[in-house]
Amino acid sequence: MHRGAFCIYFKSVLPSPPVHACSFAEDPVLYRDHRGTVHMLMHGFYDKFPGAHGWSTHPNGISDWEFSTTPAYTFNVNLAGMPTTLDQRERPQVVLQNGSLTHLFNGARKGSAPTFSMVTEVCQHGPPTRAAGTAALTCPSPHA
């Protein structure tokens, strides 16, 4: 919890949109990692991909933003152990444990089905693997 004075900052930290962009970035969520770096996840990124990631090298996160050229998340997911491609994935929210991102929540939709909330475990030590004989994906142990 933040204690003390704060300032409201109205300057956009996002890069200028490309000339032909029909979309934008929205639903930003900010968090500070265990090193003190301020990060931003957002839905959409000028039609490049569904989820974008940025970080600030400024201690308070009010300037010096950089943005990844690869998606923070895509439409490709595993639902009930089966790979599928979503039609919509937005409203990112994060869960942190000791300053490390452990879970990502999104609103999602597949086809004409109703929108639903989904949670994705964020693997810290490599890509998820599937245990023999199961449909579940698990993150590797840091001691593996």
Image (cartoon, rainbow, N blue to C red):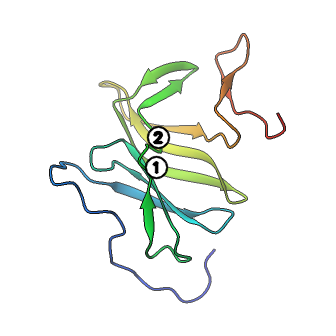
Kindly identify which residue carries mark 2.
73
Per the image, label 2 sits on a secondary structure element best described as: loop
Write down the quadrant of residue 64 in the picture.
Answer: bottom left
> How many other residues sit within 10 Å of disc 2, few (<14), some (14-19) or many (≥20)?
many
Give the position of the C terminus as an image quadrant. top right
In this view, the residue farthest toward the left is 20
Is the C-beta separation of discs 2 and 1 under 8 Å?
Answer: yes
Residue on which disc 1 sits: 92
* Side of 40 where 89 appears, left or right: left
Residue drawn at point x = 19 percent, y = 50 percent = 21
Amino acid under disc 1: Pro
Disc with the residue nearer the chain's start (2 vs 1): 2
Residue 22 at x, y percent in the picture: 17, 48
Q: Nearer the viewer, residue 110 or 53?
A: 53
* Residue found 16% across the figure and 54% down from its top: 19
Q: Indicate the amino acid at tag 2.
A: Tyr
